[in-house]
Amino acid sequence: THPPEFTPTGRYTAERQQAFDKVHDGDFLLPEERKLVHHFMMEQNGAFAWDDTERGQFREDFFPPVVIPTVEHTPWVYKNIPIPPGLYDEVCKIIRSKRDSGVYEPSNSLEPLNAVTIAHSGLPPATEDLATHFAGRAC
């Protein structure tokens, strides 16, 4: 087999080929074998996802969703895990990218929180810190 020279095809661009060669440099593959790998990646470029935006999903008619049986229970406390302020922006960026690529689905069920209202005479939560992250956004 004599694979052709590399030509950018679809998702497999010249930058991605150079990044692939940089990560896999050395003498593990012979030059002709490396050309064959690039040829294969050019032919099958739609099968590779270089980031979450290019990631696809399985068709449900071929792969039905997996139903995981669970036991109903009531948590003791409905409370989110606190995010350290130094990591907050990075965590928000990761969550937004997962949401935009379809990994996470939007959800806004407040049913458990609205089931019981508990009067608290203490100070209200620090809403300013939270509100500044949503400035200029429509809710």
Image (tube, rainbow, N blue to C red):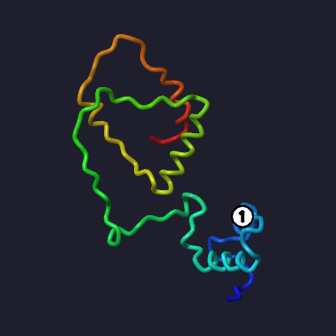
- Amino acid type, label 1: His
Q: Residue at x 61, y 30 (%)?
A: 86
Quadrant position of residue 17 = bottom right
Label 1, on which residue? 24
Residue 128 or 7: which is nearer the viewer? 7
Residue 93 coordinates in the image, percent (x, y): 57, 44
Residue 53 coordinates in the image, percent (x, y): 55, 60
Q: Residues within 10 Å of mark 1 (few under 14, many from 20)?
A: few
Quadrant position of residue 63 = bottom left
Q: Secondary structure at mark 1?
A: loop
Compared with 47, 2 (above or below) is below
Q: As drawn, is 57 to the left or to the right of 21?
A: left
Quadrant into which the N terminus falls: bottom right
Quadrant position of residue 66 = bottom left
Q: Residue at x 50, y 57 (%)?
A: 101
Compared with 88, 127 (above or below) is above
Residue 129 or 29: which is nearer the viewer? 29
Q: Residue at x 57, y 77 (%)?
A: 44
Compared with 81, 34 (above or below) is below
